[in-house]
Image (tube, grey):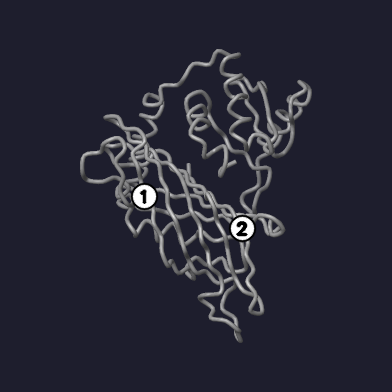
Amino acid sequence: MRASSLSNSEVLDLLSRYFVPVLYSVDDYQQAKKTKDGADEWDRIRQQAESRGLARGSVCVYLVDPGGGVLDSMLVDQAMKPAALVPMLKRVIEREKLQPRDLEKTRSRPAASLAKDASDRGGQKVNIWTRNLGANASLGASHDRVELTAEQWAAFLPESEIRSGMSWKISQQVIDKLYAYFFPPIQNYDAGNSTILSGSLNATVAEVSPKAVRLSLRGSLEMDHPLRAVEKPLAFPAKTNGRVTATVVGSALFDRQRKTVRAFQMVSEQADYLWHWQGNPVQWQFVLAAELSP
């Protein structure tokens, strides 16, 4: 979803204007266990969807009204296609006569609180997840939290006047801090062993107002990250046995006056991990996603 429908501009526009998106994972991924109330609510939504003849499953998109009633649902193998998800969203919007939200009004107070938190904590954290595809999916997902300082977030915006359509490069310091974690779940989880060979991240102004600026992000990465921690004897150089190549896309929303971030998302458009076994190349595909921590 993150690399397909949730990267589609029409889907993002409908979700942000008419809905309150919530991601609920049925897996704990070795994090804190879910509360009983949360698990019970999840079961209630699935059971109600089934009783209404709607799609139900552990990997599913549910549209729920403010009172908790299930309005519609779609399994992810279909919802991951924008051509399938967009009509469902529009159908519910029209049937329920939903009105678009005033994004500036709804975000103005959180932005002020966010700015205070940033100054109190010195920055904000980004959640980064990666997961192998295909036969290696059984390895599960990795999860890291990386903090960018208030100064590093502010560096996303140029000092010059911001105009719609203008583009610029994000500072290398920010790139190096985030991209070091862009490797798949493997035996070596230490981002300190990442060696970025080349990395770029460009920002383009997608929307600008006196209060906020929305950026479209696009970047690329080539990085060495060894398959496992250093062990001896090795038949290959430890720092080069594992090559990541990836392209990423994303978006960010900033408060122009405070230079604080309100929203930040990034997903892989393409990501591969190449290593060698007994002199033969082995290549894995993987996906990655990054999102501002609440």
Q: Quadrant of residue 179?
A: bottom left
Q: Is residue 111 above or below residue 170?
A: above
Q: Is residue 291 left or right of residue 35?
A: left
Query: Relative to 235, does residue 145 appear above or below in the rendering?
Result: above
Inspect the image, locate mark 2, and give the three-letter code of the amino acid beneath it.
Gln
Is 108 placed above or below 156 here? above
Q: Report x, y in % for residue 70.
A: 67, 23
- Percent from the top left, x then y, of residue 56? 74, 31
Q: Secondary structure at mark 2?
A: strand
Distance from the alpha carbon under mark 1 to that under mark 2: 24 Å
- Tell whether 224 sits left or right of 31: left
The residue shown at (53%, 26%) is: 19
User: Which residue extends farthest bottom?
Assistant: 233
274 to 83, vertically: above or below: below
Who's the residue at 58% across and 63% down the image? 273
Q: Position of residue 169 (x, y in %)?
A: 32, 52
Residue that numbered label 1 is attached to: 202
Count of numbered labels shown in the rendering: 2
The crowding category of the residue bearing disc 2, from other C-alpha atoms within 10 Å (few below 14, some 14 to 19, many at least 20), is: many
Q: Nearer the viewer, residue 139 or 29?
A: 139
The crowd level at tag 1 (other Cα within 10 Å; few <14, some 14-19, many 20+) is some
Per the rendering, the mark at residue 212 is: none
Q: What quarter of the picture does the N terminus occupy? A: top right
Mark 1 or 2, nearer chain start: 1
Query: Is residue 99 toward the left or the right of residue 86 in the image?
Result: left
| Residue position for label 2 | 285
Q: Amino acid at mark 1?
A: Asn
Q: Are marks 1 and 2 in contact (CB under 8 Å)?
A: no
Q: Which residue is located at x 30 percent, y 50 percent?
A: 155
Q: Nearer the viewer, residue 222 or 70?
A: 222
**Residue in view at x 60 percent, y 84 percent:** 234
Classify mark 1: helix, strand or loop. Answer: strand
